[in-house]
Image: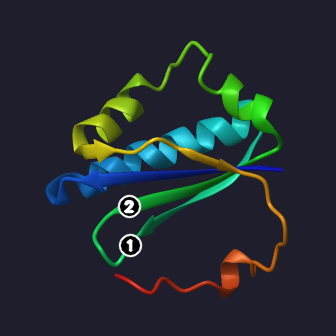
Amino acid sequence: MFIVLYRWQLKPEQVKEFKEGWSEIVHRNIEKYGALGSRLHRASDGSWYSYSQWNNRSCWQSAFNMDDSNQLARQKMANAIIKSYEPVTMAPSLNHLLSDEMVTPAFG
């Protein structure tokens, strides 16, 4: 398994559009490029994080080398971003995550 952590500062008035574009890209990555899913988080400092799981690094890289039919989704995200940080890639060492049904957001 291969993990990618993304971080952004977003325009508050465009968070809804960002979420829409982000969701479209995540579903495309699951259907076509071997992504295992992703979670979008709002941090207590107002920044946004996405935690994405992939089968391996090559699946993640292949998602960037495609003829992207999701330009509208990417544009929704891009329009909302004030600042984007370099992604952090990780390999899991231990796993104690609960299933999605057991997770409740801490921030609205």
20 displayed left or right of 92: left
The mark that comes first in sequence, 1 or 2, is 1
x, y percent for residue 15: 27, 56
63 displayed left or right of 74: right
Look at the picture and state if 47 lies above or below 3: below
Work out how far the residue at label 1 is from the one at label 2, CA to CA, in angstroms: 6 Å
Q: Mark 2 sits on what residue?
A: 48
Q: Secondary structure at mark 2?
A: strand
- Kind of residue at disc 1: Ala
13 displayed left or right of 87: left
x, y percent for residue 85: 40, 45
79 displayed left or right of 90: left
Q: Are the residues tagged 1 and 2 within 8 Å (C-beta)?
A: yes
Q: Which residue is nearer to you in this view: 8 or 39? A: 8
What residue sits 15% from the left and 57% below the top? Answer: 13
x, y percent for residue 68: 52, 18
- Kind of residue at disc 2: Trp
Q: Which residue is nearer to you in this view: 45 or 15? A: 45
Q: Mark 1 sits on what residue?
A: 43
Q: Which residue is nearer to you in this view: 85 or 31? A: 85
Q: How is the image coloured?
A: rainbow
What residue sits 40% from the left and 34% below the top? Answer: 73
What residue sits 45% from the left and 46% below the top? Answer: 22
x, y percent for residue 71: 41, 23
Q: Secondary structure at mark 1?
A: loop
User: Badge 2 local density, few (<14 within 10 Å), some, or many (20+)?
Assistant: some
What residue sits 69% from the left and 34% below the top? Answer: 60
